[in-house]
Image (cartoon, rainbow, N blue to C red):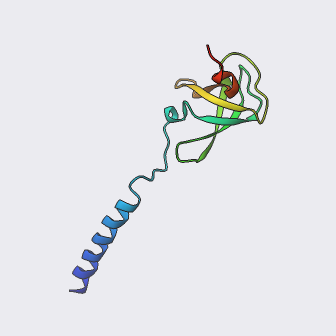
Amino acid sequence: ISLLTTAYAGQGLSKLMARVFKDTTGSVSSQSLVGMMGSVVYAVTATGGVVHVRDKSGNIHRVVCKSLESETIEPNEEILVVDFDDKARVYYVMPYAKALEPR
């Protein structure tokens, strides 16, 4: 009887926990960072660089990137992630202030 009671209570507890944590995910797709803001850690050029980008949950991701328009973006500048190259596994970024300029 105690085995059945424990199994039944465990099943109820697992269903409750599933409802509480249903929107929590630990993984982020590469494409989900496109359109997000970040800041430069190591200067970004046409050949490479490193930035910190926050996902929709507020988690920080350190990603390898390249400048979209072959310009140098200095450390601590705000950036916008514009694209992701799946083959090269690299993000393309541009200065956030430049992204806000009308075209």
Residue lying at 75% horizontally and 32% vertically, measured from the top left:
77
Residue 44's place in the image compared with 7, above or below, is above
Residue located at (55% from left, 30% from top): 35
Image location of residue 59, percent across then percent down: 58, 48
> In the displayed structure, does residue 92 sit left or right of residue 16?
right
Image quarter hosting the N terminus: bottom left
Residue 43 appears left or right of 9: right
> What percent of the width, then of the height, locates residue 49?
72, 29
Counting labels gives: 0
- Residue farthest to the front? 102
Give x and y (percent) for residue 2.
Answer: 25, 86
Asked where in the image residue 11 lies, by quadrant, the reply is bottom left
14 to 43, vertically: above or below: below
Quarter of the image for residue 71 reads top right
Q: Quadrant of the C terminus?
A: top right
State the residue at coordinates (28%, 71%): 12
| Residue placed furthest toward the top | 103
